[in-house]
Image (tube, helix red, strand yellow):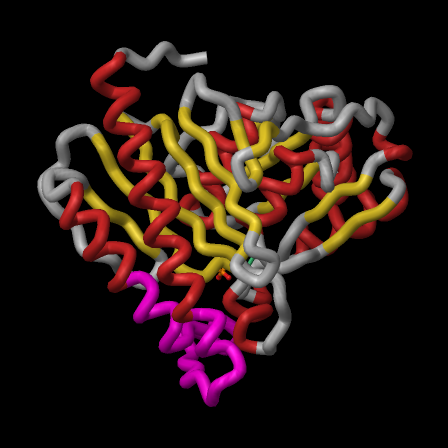
Amino acid sequence: MQSTNMTDLALLQRAKDVAVSLAEEAGDIQRAAQHDDNQVHYKGSIDLVTDADIASEKLISAGILREFPEHRLTGEEGAVGSTEHGYRWLIDPIDGTTNFAHGQPHWAVSICLEHQGNPVMGVVYDVAKREMFTAITGQGAYLNGKPIKASSADELIQAMGATGFSYDISERANSFRLWESFNQNARAMRRNGAAALDMVWVACGRLDFYFERPINNWDVSAGVIICREAGAQVSRTNGEPYQIEDREICATNGLLHEQVIQLIHQTLADEAS
Ligand code: LIP
């Protein structure tokens, strides 16, 4: 676990407080907008963006730059950038956009602060359930202020997992193969449609594992630090160390990691042979 000196820790605690406040403000916008005639735009044939996405990202970005003008920003809807001082924020104003646009109560605001490629602070806010997941490196992971930890399932057949599917339908073939394979080898599989919530559900034990490829770093980076601080394990889908620019993720309770990585490898190798 990375040691954090006092100055950094004070900055990270301030960053968490700012992120929590901005996530709650964005959540208020989203709750009010979900059932209005919220203008839906198409980034692709099934890749949606709503006015609430755009308004939330503007609010969050402006709030962060007001407090941390020297930090850089990366967001799903094209957030602004600034001079880099080793710190970068990754923002997904609405993770689970399709759920949100269809009126389903399962989406999140995801805000991560990374330092030199390492997620060091994460906030994931489940707006509909008013569940605030937070973590700072070395300081533990919390749900509404209460400590959380990953599950203790140690056999895949006793485990519940989740995954997701790309907006690019041509990229889904391997995901479908993995979906079938894990449905045959795990107790149950879910496709919840919000990567940030899948990640924090691994952190709090509601899921035993989650993997997805491709997935954007703004979807999962806050979940990475929350998982790590909750005792979960995070890697690439082949077991290699996760890197912040990766477009894939595998998060488990740690006990199942090898079994999950092995089944992913075996399923895709069988297909290739
Ligand atoms: C979504 C993820 C989901 C994935 C979708 C999409 P968005 O993020 O949360 O897990 O399967 O393809 O990436 O677009 O709602 O922020």
Residue 227 pos. (x, y %): 56, 30
Looking at the rendering, the stretch of residues picked out in magenta corresponds to 30-57
User: 98 left or right of 56?
Assistant: right
| In the foreground, 177 or 41 | 41
User: 10 left or right of 92?
Assistant: left
Is residue 190 found inside the magenta-colored segment of the image? no
Residue 271 pos. (x, y %): 75, 44
User: 104 left or right of 24?
Assistant: right
Q: Is residue 171 visible?
A: no
Which residue is at 37% across, 40% downward? 112
- Quadrant of the image occupied by residue 61: bottom left
Which residue is at 57% across, 46% downward? 213
- Quadrant of the image occupied by residue 76: bottom left
Is residue 43 found inside the magenta-colored segment of the image? yes
Against 6, residue 197 (above or below) is below
Residue 270 pos. (x, y %): 78, 38
Q: Is residue 28 visible?
A: yes
User: 34 left or right of 200?
Assistant: left
Residue 192 pos. (x, y %): 67, 57
